[in-house]
Image (cartoon, coloured by chain):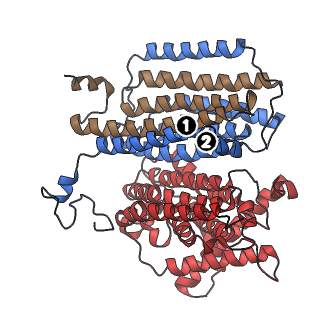
Chain colours: A blue, B brown, C red
């Protein structure tokens, strides 16, 4: 794609940047939980668009893929748990809004001051032919430890999440002697185990 | 436009996302909305990592690996957040973090 | 470096228009084949066009307090994403745009389509539409991972996530020979993502049409066209990834790809229309408990074959 950012790419990056922050603000402004979720998705997609312009094709597409799946599931939980899912009865559910705004703004100012005062070393770096290949070779080679830790972490997450979220154990499914012919599930599956 | 200026603009956007996300995570009362705030902070991390790779060190894969780690952190945060919300709701029929304090003791 | 993309060869605007035209034609072909299988041959090609024109002229009806913004976004997104997924499918040996992660791009468009269909169900503030939307979420989630593994398996054998590289890797042997499971799962997963045929439960009669129940006029046209285009695009992708794309004797390459696409569409519709609609609460468990391990095993077999130099 773009080895040096062209004028078009810079314009696109700027527009997408404004869009991502605007969508991020919208998450906490809109009343409808469905809209808030999809505003967050819009913010993610805008960031994915910027990554695409920055030649990080794989990461951009994976961000879009993972965040879309996450946000669709997020929508289910938002609507399940929130008191006002469709925003038909506006209400605010915030605490310490002023303090939070101060912290948010303070962190932004701190970061911005750093960003605009540091002398960034951007002198003609060497670009790889293919960023996807670079990443793949890194996580399967020099950075394999990261991938191993991620794998174990995700496995632990699956176990922990299931244990926390489900209230039923094997004795609820198969009876006190674990000898029921078919498990007693609220929704029977297709395999009749 | 110099590369440094573009880098600074992109990083400012990332800082904006982090600021907005922090505001949300600190001010919202419901667990799910707090998670939305945290996701927004991590979104800023993704953007900053991508910009760091492109403008500062494209010859090294480290920034890309950092973005992958941030993506995984997002997934873990989501899954555990939902699991905790479900467990909490099952125990108390509540989804507000303020009321989680009555689980104490 | 990869060969030219369509956008580089024809210029951006003609290439985009060309892909849109290909997408529309594929959609009409799917609708026509569907009609032939269900009703017999009479007026097969004319009927989809006629009903499209009727839907265009039809006045839109609405519901009480709909979420109009999200509803419209969902309706427009369905055909747009179907066309975007076509952007990485080789047409005449070239893709509209070529990245080093084409297969993931196709998958991402599917995931976005999934979210968009939920929006179509959420928008009208109606119980049947929302039920259909939730059914589709559960079904799509269960078929997302097997589909992902099936796509990645093709990329694994070719050693590249670029569609044109996968096609080029099949000059000696079609990938379907060594990965039949991945091929079947890909086609079935595509049908599940277009909630079509046996996977049509999100839009089924028991919930009065489900996600499509409150759609009318242009909205219905967009969603139905999006489903058809997505099925056509998936068939073209299946032909490219597993059936050798444009390789074949005597005839020119693009024609071979077209013929294979038509064969996949015909097989898909012929089989799909002969099966009953499957209950999502049953099929979802099959997706998680059978298809995920199966596709993982398939990927393992292919990985071992790659290590032995089988595809080199």
Q: In this view, does A179 lie to the left or right of C147?
A: left
Q: Quadrant of the C terminus of chain C?
A: bottom right
Q: Is residue C194 visible?
A: no
Q: Which residue is drawn at the image coordinates 66% and 13% (left, top)?
A: A114
Q: Which residue is drawn at the image coordinates 70% and 74% (left, top)?
A: C173
Given the image, what chain letter belongs to the residue carrying mark 1? Answer: A
- Is the C-beta separation of discs 2 and 1 under 8 Å? yes
- Front residue (pair C104, A24): C104
- From this view, report whether residue A62 is shown above or below residue C82: above
Image x and y of residue C221, in percent? 59, 64
Residue furthest out toward the left: A176
For marks 2 and 1 on the same chain, the one whose residue lies earlier in the sequence = 2
Same subunit: marks 2 and 1: yes
Residue B44's quadrant in the figure? top right
- From this view, report whether residue C95 is shown above or below residue A64: below
The residue at which mark 2 appears reads as A139
Residue furthest out toward the front: C308
The residue at which mark 1 appears reads as A146
Label 1 crowd (10 A; few <14 / some 14-19 / many >=20)? some
Q: Which residue is drawn at the image coordinates 61% and 22% (left, top)?
A: B15
């Amino acid at each position: 794609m773009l080895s040096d950012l062209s004028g078009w790419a810079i314009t696109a990056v700027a527009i997408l940047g404004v869009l991502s922050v605007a969508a991020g603000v919208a998450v906490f402004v809109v009343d409808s939980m469905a809209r808030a979720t999809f505003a967050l998705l819009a913010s993610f997609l805008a960031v994915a668009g910027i990554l695409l312009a920055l030649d990080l094709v794989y990461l951009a597409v994976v961000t879009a893929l993972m965040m879309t799946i996450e946000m669709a599931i997020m929508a289910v939980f938002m609507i399940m748990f929130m008191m006002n899912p469709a925003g038909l009865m506006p209400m605010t559910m915030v605490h310490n809004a002023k303090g939070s705004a101060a912290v948010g703004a303070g962190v932004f100012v701190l970061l911005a001051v750093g960003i605009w005062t540091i002398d960034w070393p951007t002198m003609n770096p060497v670009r790889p032919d293919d960023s996807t290949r670079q990443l793949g070779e890194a996580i399967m080679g020099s950075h394999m430890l990261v991938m191993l830790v991620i794998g174990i972490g995700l496995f632990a997450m699956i176990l922990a999440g299931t244990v926390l979220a489900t209230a039923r154990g094997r004795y609820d499914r198969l009876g006190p002697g674990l000898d029921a012919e078919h498990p007693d599930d609220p929704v029977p599956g297709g395999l009749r185990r | 436009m110099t590369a440094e200026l573009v880098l600074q603009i992109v990083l400012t956007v990332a800082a904006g996302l982090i600021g907005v996300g922090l505001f949300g995570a600190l001010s919202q009362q419901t667990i799910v909305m707090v998670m939305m705030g945290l996701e927004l902070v991590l979104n800023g991390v993704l953007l900053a990592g991508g910009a760091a790779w492109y403008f500062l060190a494209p010859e090294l894969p480290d920034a890309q690996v950092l973005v992958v780690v941030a993506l995984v952190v997002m997934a873990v945060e989501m899954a555990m957040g939902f699991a905790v919300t479900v467990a909490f709701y099952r125990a108390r029929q509540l989804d507000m973090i303020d009321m989680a304090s009555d689980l104490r003791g | 470096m990869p060969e030219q993309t369509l956008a580089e060869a024809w210029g951006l605007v003609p290439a985009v228009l060309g892909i849109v035209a290909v997408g529309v034609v594929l959609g009409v072909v799917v609708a026509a084949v569907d009609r032939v299988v269900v009703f017999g041959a009479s007026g097969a090609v004319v009927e989809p066009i006629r009903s499209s024109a009727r839907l265009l002229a039809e006045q839109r009806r609405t519901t009480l307090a709909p979420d109009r913004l999200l509803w419209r976004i969902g309706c427009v997104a369905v055909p747009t994403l179907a066309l975007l997924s076509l952007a990485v499918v080789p047409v005449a040996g070239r893709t509209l745009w070529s990245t080093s992660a084409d297969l993931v791009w196709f998958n991402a468009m599917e995931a976005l389509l999934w979210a968009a269909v939920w929006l179509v169900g959420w928008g009208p503030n109606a119980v049947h539409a929302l039920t259909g939307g939730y059914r589709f979420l559960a079904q799509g989630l269960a078929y997302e991972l097997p589909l992902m593994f099936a796509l990645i398996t093709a990329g694994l054998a070719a050693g590249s996530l670029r569609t044109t590289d996968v096609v080029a890797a099949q000059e000696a042997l079609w990938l379907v020979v060594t990965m039949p499971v991945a091929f079947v799962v890909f086609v079935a997963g595509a049908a599940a993502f277009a909630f079509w045929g046996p996977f049509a439960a999100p839009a089924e009669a028991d919930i009065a049409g489900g996600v499509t129940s409150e759609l009318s006029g242009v909205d219905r046209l967009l969603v139905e066209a999006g489903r058809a285009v997505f099925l056509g695009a998936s068939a073209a992708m299946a032909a490219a990834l597993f059936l050798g794309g444009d390789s074949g004797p005597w005839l020119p390459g693009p024609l071979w790809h077209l013929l294979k696409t038509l064969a996949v569409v015909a097989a898909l519709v012929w089989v799909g229309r002969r099966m009953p609609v499957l209950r999502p609460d049953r099929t979802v468990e099959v997706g998680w408990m059978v298809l995920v391990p199966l596709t993982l095993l398939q990927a393992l077999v292919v990985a071992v074959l790659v290590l032995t130099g089988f595809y080199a």
